[in-house]
């Protein structure tokens, strides 16, 4: 079901960037992000709040898959996959199953999106977890190199040329 890698070529984030910037960029381009995810995804929310045992937790992105009839939790991670991400995702999937899932829904699926992953670490991390959790890479289009920036007009220059902006 999961692609690998996901290509977020509609984003232009410069290094260094934060996970929150990636999240905001994906939500800003939600239609393109949904197309990259594939058919059947419905956006539920970002930084979706869950309260468990009196403590607050926030899911990076929460979707519902219309054909699979289940919630999909997506955690965005900058850098390499770390084994502890699997435990956190297992917790999130359990919490969503308990707090949000209807009795007619299928079990929640978790997807950890990292810039890079080591397949062996990923395999060991998920080996005895019985929830459906996947780990995929994502790719970004980098911002224009400095040597090209000076030869292309800025957004402001293009808007001025077109008559003051695009509405």
Image: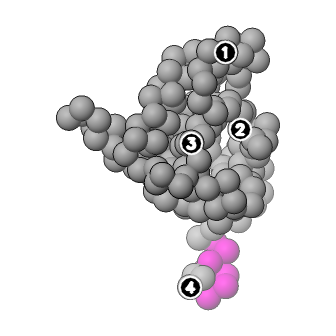
Q: Position of residue 19 (x, y in %)?
A: 51, 37
Q: Which of marks 2 and 4 is in front?
A: 2
> Quick check: is 162 in the magenta stretch?
yes
- Mark 3 vs 2: CB contact within 8 A: no
> Quick check: is 31 in the magenta stretch?
no
Q: Nearer the viewer, mark 4 or mark 1?
A: 1
Relative placement, left or right, of 128 versus 53 is right
Which residue is outermost to the front? 103
Question: Which one is nearer the viewer's eye here, 64 or 155?
Answer: 64
Label 4 CA crowd tier, 10 Å (few <14, some 14–19, many 20+): few
Relative placement, left or right, of 118 versus 157 is right
Give the mark nearest the N terminus, 4 or 1: 1
Q: What residue is drawn where x is 55% and y is 60%?
A: 43
Residue named by callout 4? 167
| Picture quadrant where residue 147 is located | top right
Give the mark nearest the N terminus, 1 or 3: 3
Residue named by callout 1? 127
Q: Which of marks 3 and 2 is in front?
A: 3
Give the mark nearest the N terminus, 1 or 2: 1
Q: Quadrant location of the N terminus? A: top right
- The mark found on residue 151 in the picture is none
Q: Position of residue 163 (x, y in %)?
A: 62, 88
Which residue is outermost to the left? 54
Distance (Cα) linking label 1 and label 3: 18 Å
Give the mark nearest the N terminus, 4 or 3: 3
Q: Give the range drawn in magenta.
A: 157-163
Q: Quadrant location of the C terminus? A: bottom right
Residue named by callout 2? 138
Distance (Cα) linking label 1 and label 2: 22 Å
- Mark 1 vs 2: CB contact within 8 A: no
Distance (Cα) linking label 4 and label 1: 51 Å
Residue named by callout 3? 107
């Amino acid at each position: 079901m999961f692609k690998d890698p996901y290509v977020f070529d509609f984003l232009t984030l410069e290094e260094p960037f934060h996970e929150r910037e990636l999240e905001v960029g994906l939500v800003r381009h939600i239609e393109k992000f949904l197309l990259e995810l594939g058919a059947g995804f419905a956006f539920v929310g970002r930084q979706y709040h869950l309260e468990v045992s009196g403590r607050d937790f926030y899911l990076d992105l929460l979707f519902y898959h219309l054909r699979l009839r289940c919630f999909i939790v997506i955690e965005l991670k900058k850098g390499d996959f770390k084994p502890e991400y699997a435990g956190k995702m297992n917790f999130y999937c359990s919490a969503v199953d308990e707090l949000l899932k209807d009795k007619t829904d299928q079990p929640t699926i978790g997807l950890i999106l990292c810039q890079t992953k080591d397949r062996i670490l990923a395999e060991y991390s998920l080996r005895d977890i019985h929830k459906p959790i996947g780990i995929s890479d994502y790719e970004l289009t980098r911002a224009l190199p400095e040597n090209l920036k000076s030869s292309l007009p800025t957004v402001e220059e293009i808007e001025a040329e077109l008559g003051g902006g695009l509405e």
